[in-house]
Amino acid sequence: MPQQQDWVPAGIDTATPSGARTYDYLLGGAHNFQADRDAAVYAEKIMPGVRDIARLNRAFLGRVVRFMVHEGIRQFIDLGSGIPTVGNVHEVAAGIHPDCRVVYVDRDPIAVAHSRLLLKPIGSAAIVEADFGDPEAIFTSPEVRRLLDLSEPVGALMVALLHWIPDEKGLLALLAEHRARLPAGSYLAISHLSSDQQAARIDGAVEMFNGAKGRDKATTRRYDEIESMFGDFELVEPGLTGCALWRPGGPGDISENPEANAQIYGGVAKKIR
């Protein structure tokens, strides 16, 4: 289709599903192909309701960004961003205040290539190709140096990212390093898949998904494990909760299925000092 060709980078294999494009499809976006749609159908078979969960998580992201802008944040770093799809950070933030700047970060070359094309005409947003496991490469990148002032508060977003990082990668130490690089007054938003609700069903679905996906493996964690990821940052009300229940703005932010509302925990915390 012509409209697809405008955003397809040269050399990208569109016959192999991409996690970023599959997520885009689940959200109703246009930057996906048949392989991605097939992967989404498979995900829905092994974890019914995944489309609803993706929507709730994305709505949480939008509310978090709006909250941070209203709190005075004008610069954001979105880690594990995927493709800037439906409800992307730079459009949500700029819709409230035109001076907001956003740096997206992802390690997936497919997501990065798509993002570079999509963001090319936007001077206030950029993408960094880097791994969450290399904070030095992220925070010293030319894009971060150009768009972010690290002497001023930053809105750091780790939305649906950390369940892709296993404990053996030293997750807690990496989180501490990321938090340490944020100036006082910054906010940190986290959403994370949990098996606290329907443990057997969710863990079984994740095990099947891990066996089929490839190098990326999901890890579900308990409430207390996720809460510890904020370190000494102070959680804002209502604390860590089902992401759909974090300051919902209306019926569209909450699912009719109560289990979906709490399948992913979400929270925001502020760095006081």
Image (tube, helix red, strand yellow):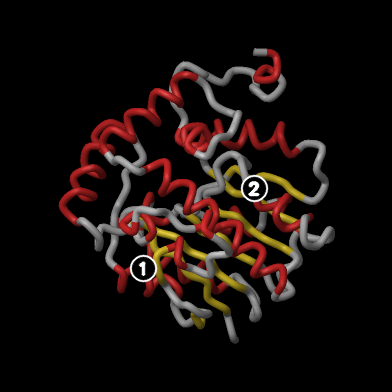
The residue lying toward the viewer, choosing from 155 and 173, is: 155
Whether residue 231 is situated above or below residue 89 in the rendered picture: below
**Of labels 2 and 1, the one closer to you:** 2
- Residue at (52, 21) in percent of width and height: 33
Whether residue 184 is situated above or below residue 195 in the rendered picture: below
Amino acid of disc 1: Ile
- Residue at (37, 74) in percent of width and height: 228
- Which element carries disc 2, helix, strand or loop? loop
- Residue at (36, 40) in percent of width and height: 216
Answer left or right for 153 relative to 245: right
Earlier sequence position, callout 2 versus callout 1: 2
In the picture as drawn, the residue positioned furthest to the left comes out as: 200
10 Å neighbourhood of mark 1: few (<14), some, or many (≥20)? many
Answer left or right for 71 relative to 209: right
- Per the rendering, the mark at residue 193 is none
Report the residue marked by disc 1.
226
- Which element carries disc 1, helix, strand or loop? helix
Q: Position of residue 57 (x, y in %)?
A: 48, 53
Q: Position of residue 229 (x, y in %)?
A: 41, 70
Whether residue 266 is situated above or below residue 106 in the rendered picture: below
How many badges with numbers are in the image? 2
Amino acid of disc 2: Asn
Answer left or right for 99 relative to 62: right
The residue lying toward the viewer, choosing from 163 and 248, is: 248
Of the 4 image quadrants, the one containing the N terminus is top right
- Per the rendering, the mark at residue 88 is 2
